[in-house]
């Protein structure tokens, strides 16, 4: 299919085809020029082994070249895969299924000119999200000296690590912004230490610790919540030693000192099928603080429509169903296999409707000019950075990415752990491992 698209789209820069000028690429996602640009990007990504959504192909109003050229008797893209939106325009499909979403105000002023794909490399090590109960922070979130983020940053600054995250990439070369994770898939033990240091974020997550002075920490791609983390330098060091060190797998360190003092923390597999992290950092740039609540509202509407419960506070972490990972017995391989088994049993983890998604605000992600921006993480280890996300595009985020494990090409900034050759044609894309 994408080979036929390529024959129809000689380039994404407007090069004339058969003497007919290409349509201009205007602001917005659904103009003819923009759709054709996305279709070409979809082919590039699929050729690299990335599961991609094909709706842009169906939306393209320019059929592929004549039958003599493509061997399909003149059948165009829409005829090949059918109209992705029940025979309607995308706007009508969204209106009929979900209702009307609020438009972004003019103050957001999204950048539609520069390349989105490759605008910020993904982390290949761990991602650490710390509870603060807030949606805005100092300009540098780790400057808040009363926060666990401040303490964890001090510990990380003393560690030796390599593999720094790339800052940008070449849109025509996915290898520069779609990276392999440094971690093996769930159920698999580490083959060696993880060199890259964790990426650290503060979040609006409300701590579910019994002690009000303790915090809750989410760790990816481990897919676990660490409860009862003492908000102190000793607590941060214990978090590193027990959950974040590059020598540890998903199961983490076994119980230490009978769980006394800073070792009282306990880790549990997250109950979510996906987590969406929305930038809301007003003191860095007001655009994301305006976009975040609008995107959150649209996400809740769409997810609920598909029978998916939404946790916006972290309350689902308060009463874990299974025991703490620190208490797992057996060899390291056996402990990792048990973590993988628990992850595999999360409702909705393999796609389709149902289950639960966590949505939390976090600090600066970079690329505010592409507001709204978000991270989406999955139990499979997949990490996505999306930009230019409007409320009207949230149905695609939900239907294509969360339900089916497919990347929406026109929203992609960068990704890690998503390469699955041949998975575009499969139902669950990068949700599988």
Image (tube, rainbow, N blue to C red):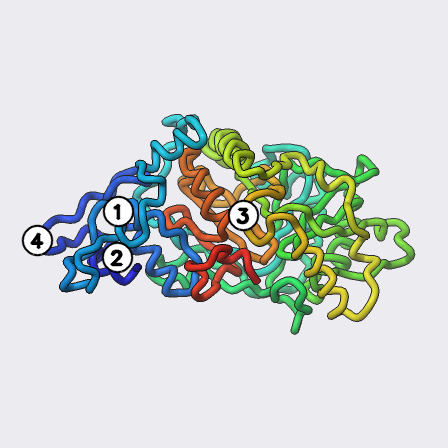
Percent coordinates x, y for residue 342 in the rendering: 71, 56
Answer whether labels 2 and 4 touch (C-beta < 8 Å): no
Percent coordinates x, y for residue 24 in the rendering: 20, 43
Instruction: Say which label, 1 or 4, has the lower sequence index.
Output: 4
Instruction: Say which label, 2 or 1, has the lower sequence index.
Output: 2
Instruction: Say which label, 2 or 4, has the lower sequence index.
Output: 2
Instruction: Give the CA separation, mark 2 to mark 4.
Output: 18 Å
Q: Is residue 305 visible?
A: yes
Answer whether labels 2 and 1 touch (C-beta < 8 Å): yes
Percent coordinates x, y for residue 113 in the rendering: 30, 43
Q: Nearer the viewer, mark 1 or mark 4?
A: 1
Percent coordinates x, y for residue 219 in the rendering: 66, 52
- Which quarter of the picture shows residue 388? top left
Q: Nearer the viewer, mark 4 or mark 3?
A: 3
Instruction: Give the CA separation, mark 4 to mark 3.
Output: 44 Å
Answer whether labels 4 and 3 touch (C-beta < 8 Å): no
- Which quarter of the picture shows residue 176? bottom left
Q: Which residue is mark 1?
A: 60
Q: Which residue is mark 2?
A: 5
Q: Nearer the viewer, residue 61 or 312?
A: 61
**Mark 4: secondary structure:** loop
Q: Nearer the viewer, mark 2 or mark 3?
A: 3
Instruction: Give the CA separation, mark 2 to mark 1.
Output: 9 Å
Question: What residue occupies the far left of the structure in this picture?
Answer: 19
Instruction: Give the CA separation, mark 3 to mark 1.
Output: 26 Å
Q: Residue at x 66, y 68 (%)?
A: 188
Q: Which residue is mark 3?
A: 352
Q: Which residue is mark 4?
A: 19
């Amino acid at each position: 299919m994408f080979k036929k698209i390529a024959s129809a789209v000689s380039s994404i820069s407007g090069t004339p085809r058969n003497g007919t000028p290409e349509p201009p690429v205007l602001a917005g996602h659904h103009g003819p020029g923009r759709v054709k640009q996305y279709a070409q990007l979809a082919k590039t990504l699929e050729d690299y082994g990335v599961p991609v959504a094909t709706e842009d192909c169906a939306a393209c109003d320019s059929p592929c070249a004549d039958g003599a050229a493509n061997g399909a008797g003149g059948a165009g893209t829409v005829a090949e895969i059918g109209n992705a939106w029940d025979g309607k325009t995308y706007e009508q499909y969204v209106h009929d299924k979900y209702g009307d979403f609020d438009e972004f105000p003019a103050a957001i002023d999204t950048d539609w000119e520069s390349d989105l794909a490759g605008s910020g490399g993904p982390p290949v090590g761990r991602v650490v999200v710390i509870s603060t109960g807030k949606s805005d922070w100092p300009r540098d979130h780790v400057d808040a000296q009363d926060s666990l983020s401040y303490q964890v940053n001090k510990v990380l600054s003393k560690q030796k690590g390599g593999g720094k995250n790339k800052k940008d990439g070449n849109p025509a070369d996915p290898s520069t912004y779609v990276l392999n994770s440094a971690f093996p898939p769930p159920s698999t033990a580490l083959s060696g230490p993880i060199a890259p240091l964790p990426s650290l974020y503060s979040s609006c997550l409300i701590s579910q610790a019994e002690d009000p002075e303790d915090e809750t920490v989410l760790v990816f791609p481990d897919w676990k919540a660490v409860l009862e983390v003492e908000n102190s330098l000793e607590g941060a060091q214990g978090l590193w030693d027990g959950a974040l060190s590059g020598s540890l797998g998903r199961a983490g360190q076994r119980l230490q000192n009978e769980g006394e003092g800073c070792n009282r923390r306990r880790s549990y597999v997250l109950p979510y099928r996906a987590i969406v992290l929305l930038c809301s950092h007003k003191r860095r740039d007001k655009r994301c603080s305006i976009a975040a609540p609008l995107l959150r509202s649209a996400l809740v509407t769409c997810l609920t429509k598909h029978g998916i419960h939404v946790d916006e506070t972290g309350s689902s972490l308060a009463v874990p169903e299974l025991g703490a990972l620190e208490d797992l017995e057996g060899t390291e391989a056996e402990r990792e296999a048990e973590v993988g088994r628990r992850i595999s049993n999360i409702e909705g983890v393999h796609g389709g409707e149902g289950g639960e998604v966590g949505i939390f605000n976090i600090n600066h992600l970079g690329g505010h000019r592409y507001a709204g921006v978000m991270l989406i993480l999955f139990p499979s280890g997949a990490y996505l950075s999306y930009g230019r996300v409007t409320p009207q595009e949230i149905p695609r985020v939900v239907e294509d990415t969360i339900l089916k494990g497919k990347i929406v090409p026109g929203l992609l900034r960068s990704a890690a752990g998503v390469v699955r050759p041949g998975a575009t044609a499969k139902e669950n894309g990068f949700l599988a491992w």
